[in-house]
Image (cartoon, rainbow, N blue to C red):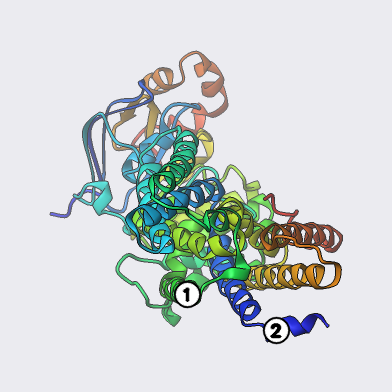
Amino acid sequence: MTAPAIDIQDLWVSIDQTPVLEGVHLRVAPGDFLGIIGPNGAGKSILLKTLLGRVRPDRGSVRVFGKPPEHARGRVAYLPQRPEFDLKFPITAREVVQMGRLRAGRWLKPLTPDDRRRAEKALAQVRMTEHAGRQIAELSQGQLQRVLIARALAVEAPLLLLDEPTSALDPGAGSELYGLLEKLQPKVTIVLVSHEIGVISQVVRSVACLNRRLHYHGSKQITREMIEDTYGDTVDFIMHRHIHRILEPPEGPGR
Amino acid sequence: MIWEALDYPFFQRALAAGLLASIACGIVGTYVVVKRMASISGGLSHAAFGGVGLGYFLGFDPMWGAVGFTLGTGLALGWAARRLASGLDTLIAMVWSVGMALGILLTALTPGYAPDLMSYLFGSILFVPPDTLTLTAGLDALILLTIVLLYKELKAIAFDENFAESVGLPVEPLFLILIGLTSLAIVTLIRVVGIILVIALLTIPAAAARHWAGSLARMMALACGFGALCTTAGLFLAYGLSARFGLNVPTGPLIILLAVGLYAVSAAFRRRAGRCCAPAPL
């Protein structure tokens, strides 16, 4: 039996003594497409960082493909919510995407023609080939976001963690990205964090609600209880705007 | 004519020292600027004085003392920097002053007079001994070799450590290598401009180069060129002032002021050209 892509047992995380995640259980099968929704400050980004081994849990176990996160590096590609680098760094979009091809233990060797080909393919997938030679400082926010998506794609990792990938994109580019992600399925397991409940519920295969505690039943169905627990007072607003789209019966027609 | 200076062996050595140091400071300075390690580098350059004092006290070449001490302090500081959640600037300030304190104390404890203490603090490019040239050339070779071998990895951690870590690159060892290279570059600059001014020559040519370079490699090449220009021009200017007007001006500060002038001119032209980026902050 293959190990689950993600296996989190009773995870507790706090940042500066403030609890951020409490008793999270999450099991994601290979090939799944999981959307995690929740309000600001719910711990969504922290959950992803825990999967990357960048945040240490207080308690509980985290396994990525059956291994601790530190040993799963290179098998996980991550798109941060905001760029974590200096935008004035002297580097072209193409060079950034090529960084997705770097691996440990390939010291002293230049990128192979194959690596370059794969980087070009990733650039083409986000339609940035035309701008590949430009400095990142010259790109618009949306173009930069597409470059970062291409960098994550260029890793060709079996697990893709995306933190609010569409927040800087216009609606057209956003749905283009979702189309692209669907094409990667089911070869790639995808975890997508967002607060756009309505949109992601149309593309993901299962949804989890997070607000320190995680509600997840391994399906796309969201109960009123999950929403209430996750969004608290704002529930009526959320329900009004989105719930008709996601509270569909489990036996209802698939997307 | 001012070119007659080239006939003097001391001037030839000074020129060589300036050019050799420019290579180190251009390459390493580029990383210092893009990875924002200026304050760590400032701390390390002053810590080097502790090594100079140690050399005097124990009776070996103070330059070797500076190499060992700066490298050791650099690695310790780099190790701590990755583990401290906050307060790195305070630690740097401590390293900065402890290095100076140790240097002063150890030189004072050394019997006899330490004649060229000032030359370490303010540089004495006109009196560079031949073995310092050999040391500088060796350090240059080491820095160049490391950069050639690890260019894309070091670029990756300078650009985005988090991403580099996520694909499995050994970020901490690479960072320590970078700190180690910075320590070595600092040593090559000590004789040229002195401990107190090292940080300027490490950052200013690279910061000016960033106005014009679209890649890290080009920024390095340009920073080496700018550094070479400033040290050479500074040397000739000092020689000219002394030969023509009988003014004895220390070379180190001249080099730094020329570098700042170059930066200002570069920033002004950059703004007029206005192609991609706003002038880089220092």
Q: Position of residue A131 (x, y in %)?
A: 66, 67
Mark 1 surroundings within 10 Å by alpha-carbon count, few (fewer than 14), some (14 through 19), many (20 or more): some
Q: Position of residue A157 (x, y in %)?
A: 35, 60
Which quadrant of the rendered structure holds the N terminus of chain A?
bottom left
Q: Which residue is mark 1?
A: B144
Subunit of mark 1?
B
Is residue A255 at least partly visible in the picture? Answer: no
Q: Position of residue A254 (x, y in %)?
A: 40, 44
Subunit of mark 2?
B
Residue A118 shown left or right of residue A130 in the figure: left
**Residue type at mark 1?**
Leu
Mark 2 surroundings within 10 Å by alpha-carbon count, few (fewer than 14), some (14 through 19), many (20 or more): some
Hey, which quadrant is residue A240 in on the image? top right
Classify A125 as above or below A5.
below
The local secondary structure at tag 1 comes to: helix
Q: Are marks 2 and 1 in contact (CB under 8 Å)?
A: no
Name the N-terminal-most of marks 2 and 1: 2
Q: Nearer the viewer, residue A235 or B16?
A: B16
Q: Which residue is mark 2?
A: B6
Residue ID at (52%, 54%): B117
Q: CA distance from mark 2 to mark 1?
A: 27 Å
Residue A63 shown left or right of residue B22 in the figure: left
Q: Position of residue A226 (x, y in %)?
A: 38, 23
Residue A220 shown left or right of residue A237 in the figure: left
Q: Nearer the viewer, residue A106 or B209?
A: B209
Classify A49 as above or below B118.
above
